[in-house]
Image: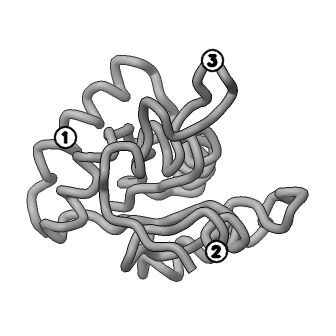
Amino acid sequence: VLPEAPALRRAREQAAKAGLPYAGAVPPQEAWALVQAGQAWLVDVRSSEERHFVGQVPGSAHVAWATGTALTRNPRFVKELESRLSGKHRPALLLCRSGKRSALAAEAAAKAGFTQVFNILEGFEGDHDTALQRGHFNGWRFHGLPWTQD
């Protein structure tokens, strides 16, 4: 077993201090560095529709937290995540639109026994600005990280 990446160790320590119910959270830039270094898997938990119409990270795995336009909770999420990660102990970074659904997904994974599931802060599109638009001050795309669109 490889030692935990320093960025994940820091995230875990911060999560413990904050009382988070999952392993921790990392900013988008650190998440991409971890993925590039082979130290974690990136799992996109957005719906297939979001990935198709808004964009996705090349090479990311996909396990929807919720499906369809109504975003109905995927009852098979934990089982599908375990299958994609080949177990419950592989470092995984979860990505959604803003970091909120991926935090819920990370919490559900932790409750199911996953030990190294982290949330990616800010999400793919980022938070709303004052005009209620995303992508203007944070998020994966805002930071210029790799993404593609169908």
Q: Nearer the viewer, residue 20 or 130?
A: 130
Q: Which residue is mark 2?
A: 52
Residue 19 visible, this angle: yes
Please rate how many residues cluster around mark 2, counting C-alpha atoms within 10 Å: few if below 14, some from 14 to 19, many from 20: few
Q: Is residue 27 left or right of residue 49?
A: left
**Dot label at residue 9:** 1
The residue sitting at 27% across, 35% down in the picture is 11
Q: Which colour assignment does the render follow?
A: one colour
The residue sitting at 90% across, 57% down in the picture is 70
> In which quadrant of the rendered image does the N terminus lie?
bottom left
Residue depth check, mark 2 versus mark 3: number of the one nearer the observer: 3
Callout 1 amino acid:
Arg
> In which quadrant of the rendered image does the C terminus lie?
bottom right
Question: Image height check: is 24 above or below 43?
Answer: above
* Residue 88, image x, y percentages: 44, 67
Callout 3 amino acid:
Thr
Callout 2 amino acid:
His
Q: Which residue is mark 3?
A: 130
Q: Is residue 100 left or right of residue 121?
A: right
Task: Return the disc, 1 or 3, that comes first in the chain's sequence.
Answer: 1
Provide the secondary structure element on which disc 1 rests. helix
The residue sitting at 61% across, 62% down in the picture is 54
Residue depth check, mark 2 versus mark 1: number of the one nearer the observer: 2
